[in-house]
Image (tube, rainbow, N blue to C red):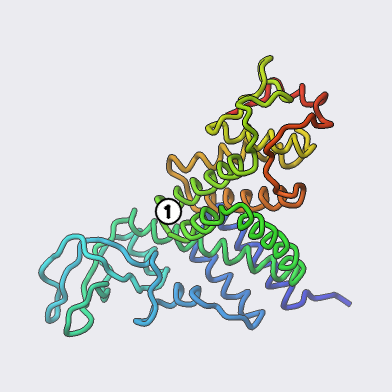
Amino acid sequence: MQNHPSRREEALELLRKVADDLAGGSEVLSCLRNYRRAQRLLGGDEGWVAMELDGYPMTEMPSWRIRRTNVYWQGKGSYSSMEAHADVCIRIPVGELYVIRDKGGRVNNCDRVKTSKDGVVWVSAKLSPTSIEVILQRISERLFDLVSSDIVSLKFGGTAESVFGEYQKAVSQAMSKLGIEDNTQNAYENLQGGNKASWRISALACRNILGDLGRKLYQAPEKAYPYIEVHGKPMPVGLKNEVNRIRAYLHQNNIGADSLLAQMLQPLYEEACRGKSDINYKEAQSILINTYVFVGELARRTNMQPVTELHRPELTASSKKQANSTVD
């Protein structure tokens, strides 16, 4: 007798396909349809995905569906009077966006974000293929986050929530203890901002978290750390040497260069510094998640007590291997 997959298993496979297709650059329309199929198998709520497929009602409008473009006022039987650079709500289904992107034309029956005193002002909007691609990219990013969360929930249920809940609690307590929780909130809020400028701010906030950790945790007066040598000299640990200060703090807590924390530190800092240039949503999200994990591991492995006086760590002999490592 052949075993048929349960509705839950079938939905999970569909969600995995959606995640793989999005990661591979597939068109978001088919991914939205497969997500809808998965939710119907589960009896779940399609949420904003249904509105992307069917069109948005007057009561709903996400930020990624608002575009600044040339609009044409709606007259009797036709459109007249063009106005440049007005913010309009693009309510049509995703499928129609693809048609307009490929064949050109206007998006009719749009409403201006700033309406008149008499009520809704209906306009026709001229959208370039680039502008439509921006909308589709925003949809793809949000769908990927949604699908990733759903897969974890289906596969692990409360186990994942419990595991990550422990990290969240540890990070929150560590940040609060050091008085540097503002950058964590700044990073999270800007990740949700929906544009490249906010994603850059999110990444730089993560860099600032690492800088704060270096300054708060390493408070010894020495400007060079004598137990790690770099090119034959003690490692510099001035206020601008943020990564080195964390490395010295780890070393004082007998956490060696081959530990997960030490190996994460330099690459994570370099990634966070990429916020100085353009960065996309998934990159900013990865930086925030890894910063969160780093702080969680740091809280788990140490007591997060600042080092104010140096002592000779047990790892001193092996630390000589760090002589040629990258330092900031």
Position in image of residue 168 (x %, y %): 67, 61
Position in image of residue 37 (x %, y %): 60, 75
- Residue 229 against residue 260 in the figure, above or below: above
Q: Name the residue under label 1.
A: 198
Relative side of 8 to 111, left or right: right
Q: Which residue is drawn at 17% across and 60% down?
A: 84
Neighbor class of circle 1 (other Cα within 10 Å; few <14, some 14-19, many 20+) is many
Q: Which of 122 and 321 is in front in this view?
A: 321
Relative side of 304 to 45, left or right: right
Q: Which of 100 and 271 is in front in this view?
A: 271
- Residue 102 against residue 206 in the figure, above or below: below
Please count the marks in the image: 1
Residue 179 location, quadrant: bottom right
Q: Which of 129 and 266 is in front in this view?
A: 266
Q: Which residue is drawn at 46% across and 52% down?
A: 199
Q: Which amino acid, by three-letter code, is at mark 1?
A: Ser
Q: Which residue lies furthest to the right in this view?
A: 1
Please identify the quadrant where the N terminus is shown: bottom right
Position in image of residue 41 (x %, y %): 66, 79
Q: Residue furthest top?
A: 232
Q: Which residue is drawn at 54% across and 48% down?
A: 206
Q: What element carries label 1?
A: helix
Position in image of residue 72 (x %, y %): 17, 68
Residue 38 location, quadrant: bottom right
- Residue 188 against residue 153 in the figure, above or below: above
Relative side of 168 to 83, left or right: right
- Residue 159 against residue 76 in the figure, above or below: above
Please identify the quadrant where the C terminus is shown: top right
